[in-house]
Image (tube, rainbow, N blue to C red):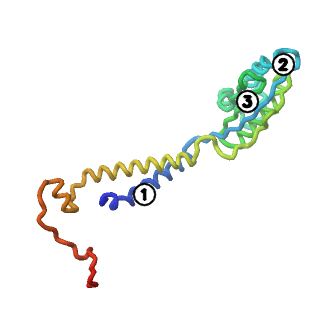
């Protein structure tokens, strides 16, 4: 108990500092991922299998022609590799519904990219000669917080790490501390009987009021 009493302030400081470090790491030291999603419905207009048409649309919406159309509307041109990292379009359970996911470093970029793709999808199908109609089911919404990293989560993790380090440090100090703090220490550690104790009168309660 004496070890805890002597070191609890250090433990609190370490825990708080680690929590702050976790927050700073998540807020300023890691790449942010703002994700905007949108869902579209691909309906075949030439009598072909609509699900197959949706499968073709997935490939066309991540094709060089689509990326060229996107780049024509962007101030900063992106390579195909960069766009591949940003855009992910998947067919939902083999249906005509396509889910598009746009992962950018800012919420505005993510939202604008999603809007741009949804607007260009019908034209790209038409350019490739695919007879289909694209309808928006779920419109893009600008994200308010990054999907990763979660600042609160990293703060809690930092605090937990700080607490564990502090607890481990206190245990190590306690195990290495051979200071005799009571008569019981002498009896337990050295197996020597205690004949008497000198009482510290300053720490005793004077019931006589003296």
Instruction: Compare marks 1 and 3 and give the one earlier in the sequence.
Output: 1
Q: Position of residue 85 (x, y in %)?
A: 65, 30
Q: Is residue 21 left or right of residue 42?
A: left
Q: Is residue 89 visible?
A: yes
Q: Are marks 1 and 2 in contact (CB under 8 Å)?
A: no
Residue placed most toward the observer, 2 or 152: 2
Task: Note whether 196 is above or below 69 in the view shown.
Answer: below
Task: Note whether 195 is above or below 53 in the view shown.
Answer: below
Q: What is the spatial separation of the Cα atoms under label 2 and label 3, in whole angstroms?
A: 19 Å
Q: Is residue 91 left or right of residue 47?
A: left
The disc placed on residue 130 is 2
Instruction: Compare marks 2 and 3 and give the one earlier in the sequence.
Output: 3
* Quadrant (top left, top right, bottom left, bottom right) of the C terminus: bottom left
Identify the residue position indicated by label 1 in the image.
Answer: 12
Binning the other alpha carbons within 10 Å of mark 3 as few (below 14), some (14 to 19) or many (20 upward) gives some
Circle 3 — which element? Answer: strand
Residue placed most toward the observer, 1 or 78: 1
Identify the residue position indicated by label 3 in the image.
Answer: 99
Circle 1 — which element? Answer: helix
Numbered label tally: 3
Instruction: Compare marks 1 and 2 and give the one earlier in the sequence.
Output: 1
Q: Is residue 59 left or right of residue 209?
A: right
């Amino acid at each position: 108990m004496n070890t805890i009493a002597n070191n609890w302030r250090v433990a609190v400081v370490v825990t708080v500092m680690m929590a702050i470090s976790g927050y700073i790491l998540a807020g300023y030291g890691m790449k942010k991922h703002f994700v905007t999603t949108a869902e579209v419905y691909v309906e075949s207009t030439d009598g072909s299998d609509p699900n197959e048409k949706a499968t073709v649309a997935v490939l066309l919406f991540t094709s060089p022609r689509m990326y060229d159309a996107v780049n024509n509307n962007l101030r900063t041109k992106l390579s195909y590799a960069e766009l591949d990292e940003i855009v992910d379009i998947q067919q939902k359970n083999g249906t005509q519904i396509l889910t598009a996911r746009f992962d950018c470093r800012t919420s505005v970029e993510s939202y604008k990219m999603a809007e741009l793709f949804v607007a260009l999808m019908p034209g790209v199908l038409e350019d490739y000669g695919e007879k289909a109609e694209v309808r928006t089911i779920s419109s893009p919404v600008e994200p308010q917080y990054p999907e990763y990293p979660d600042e609160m989560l990293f703060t809690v993790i930092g605090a937990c790490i700080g607490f564990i380090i502090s607890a481990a440090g206190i245990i190590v100090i306690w195990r290495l501390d051979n200071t005799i703090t009571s008569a019981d220490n002498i009896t337990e550690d050295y197996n020597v009987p205690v004949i008497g104790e000198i009482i510290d009168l300053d720490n005793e309660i004077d019931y006589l009021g003296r």
